[in-house]
Amino acid sequence: MTNTNITNFRKDIYNLLEQTIKYNEPINISTKNGNAVVLSEEDYNSIMETLYIISVPNLKDEIIKRANDDDKEYVSESEVDW
């Protein structure tokens, strides 16, 4: 996470935002009234999707269960008639 104060953030906003977008590295901006965090849209969407999955009852458990299922229950891609 990149840490900066509000003055330096204002001076270098373009470069800081471009780095956040390119490398998905959040920016922690400190001010005298508290801190703020800037995220890339990709990171934000990932967080929102994770929160959604966690909010659906039993979905997390079902995903974990399916990930641990025996592969014998599935048909390989090469066996599917497209």
Image (cartoon, rainbow, N blue to C red):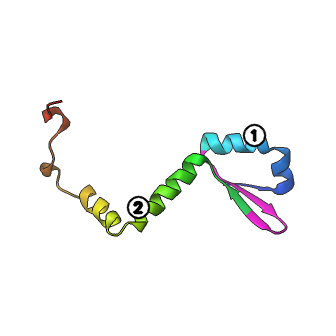
The image quadrant of residue 61 is bottom left
Residue lying at 69% horizontally and 58% vertically, measured from the top left = 37
Q: Which mark is residue 62?
A: none
Q: Name the residue nearer the viewer: 59 or 70.
A: 59
Instruction: Give the percent coordinates (x, y) of residue 21.
Output: 63, 42
Q: CA distance from mark 2 to mark 1?
A: 33 Å
Look at the image and give the residue range highlighted in magenta: 24-35
Q: Is residue 82 magenta?
A: no
* Labels 2 & 1 near each other (Cβ < 8 A): no
Compared with residue 81, is residue 48 higher up or lower down, i.e. above or below?
below
Q: Residue at x 87, y 53 (%)?
A: 7
Going from the N terminus, do you reach mark 2 or mark 1 first? Answer: 1
Badge 2 element: helix
Decide if residue 66 is on the left or right side of residue 31. Answer: left
Image quarter where the N terminus lies is bottom right
Could you classify mark 2 by the number of other residues whose Cα lies within 10 Å: few (under 14), some (14-19), or many (20 or more)?
A: some
Q: Residue at x 28, y 63 (%)?
A: 62
Q: Amino acid at mark 2?
A: Ile
> Percent from the top left, x then y, of residue 59?
33, 64
Asked whether residue 31 is drawn in magenta, I would say: yes
Residue at image mark 1? 15
Left or right: 47 with respect to 72? right
Residue depicted at 27% across the width and 56% down the height? 67
Residue at the disc numbered 2: 53
With respect to residue 22, does 56 lie above or below? below
